[in-house]
Image: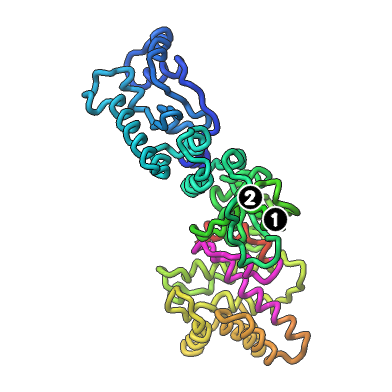
Amino acid sequence: MSLNEILQSCHGVAKSWHHITAEEVETFYRNNKENTRSLEESEKIIEKMPIIVVDNFSQLFNIYYFDCEKLVCCECLDGLFQIFNPNIVSKQFSFENKIKEIQKAQDEAIQKHNYDKALLMIPDAFRFYCLEHNTSFPEQQKFRLWLEIYNHVDYGADGEQLRAIIPHPLSPQPDLSKFEGDNLTIFRGEGSLSQPWKQAISWTTEPKTAVFFACKGYQSHPRAIYQGICRKQDVIAYITSRNENEIIIFPENVQHVKKLDIFSQETPEFQEEINNVADKYHFYTSAILPEWYPENSAHNIGHIHRTILFGLIVFDKDKNFHYTKTDEDIIMYFSALHDIGRTNDTRDKTHGQKSLNQIRQQNIVYYPAAIADRDLSWAKLFIKFHCCPDTDGYAAIKEMAHSQGEFVKMKYLFNICKDIDALDRFRINDLNPKFLRSEISKQLIFWASAISHGVK
């Protein structure tokens, strides 16, 4: 059983189940006692047994006492053992008494119209089913309760559960007034734990959220980010409580879906590219002294190494720009020294200038980047403005450029510098692709995630 399956088993929704069989009873008894019972004895136990079901998907915590009509449900591994051996515990602590206590609490919750509490007493795996099939829940509250359950379940929610309880027409409509127009551009990230987008009801208005979910789970599994269009009037819910800007919508209402062009980290091409730039990577990182960067900082030497690696990959993979050796050295100089003056891990628009001050005061020479005076000035300008708004950097580039052609070129290189720095924001789970400036940087998102988890 894989880690993914374990996570989904423990935090997901039961899709189907069956009544426990004599063979399962016999196996359970054999695993918990030295001697065994025959199938005939197990069948007799089942005849006297309360409602015991086995979740067909989960292989952990998968045996339950489940009575939907009475809203009584609980895991019952211990209970199953007590059914075999009713005299091993006192009546006060018996499984039978536990069921009675749950029944009493549920009756009280329903009587007081505390439907949220009633659902919370049911294991995650069976809440959606009970909400749909138990008649105790008022129809006008089912959609609200569905959203409450949804916010506590990590895996397994789907459109069929929602269709069964959603009111028609939906009232009130989600407040989407902050978005202009009648349509929304939405995104979905899919990783090793995700449902395919054609079956999914969860999207987001935030590309950053889509990246997070695409990169969740095993690094070696396929990933994808999809973009689609939907009408505001088709949105069922807009959830902002978890800072995910989540859109709940039926799959058929998401139109013009396209898979974004992002290099896959699971293909041989990824490892081949790492091998291609390995010699240059070791050359450029070998001259970086550990004392330049504090070890216990998010901007430590590992961040510098990864920025250098991202830069080298960009040079090799970017088909929209012809990089010269001088361009490479400018960006490598930037990568090696851009945070050398940082004294904190907070947002700091001044640490670019502080880095230049430290380079000058300590007479730091980064020998792998053999660049002349004017090219060195460009590298230092990039360092100074990499922590400032783009417009400030562009203005400084325009002032220094001797021609329009030089301005266009240096603006492109400046954007690359800011992007390779930003690609390492996976180390703090804060990469937002909408702030990446170049096409190649956006294509490297999954590679950057894998590198950030592997290069120290």
Q: Which mark is residue 249?
A: 2
Q: Position of residue 228 (x, y in %)?
A: 70, 55
Range of the magenta residues? 411-440
Q: Position of residue 312 (x, y in %)?
A: 65, 68
Q: Secondary structure at mark 2?
A: loop
Disc 2 residue type (three-letter): Ile
Q: How is the image coloured?
A: rainbow
Q: Secondary structure at mark 1?
A: strand
Magenta-drawn stretch, dominant element (helix, strand or loop): helix
Image vertical order of residue 60 relative to residue 395, above or below? above
Residue ranking furthest to the top: 40
At x 45% / y 35%, what residue is drawn?
136
Q: Which mark is residue 230?
A: 1
In the image, is residue 438 part of the stretch drawn in magenta? Answer: yes
**307 or 281: nearer the eye?**
307
At x 43% / y 27%, what residue is drawn?
67
Q: Between disc 1 and disc 2, whose residue precedes?
A: 1
Image vertical order of residue 214 relative to residue 324, above or below? above
Disc 1 residue type (three-letter): Cys
Q: CA distance from mark 1 to mark 2?
A: 9 Å
Few, some or many residues within 10 Å of mark 2 (<14, 14–19, 20+): many
Q: Image quarter for residue 269?
A: bottom right
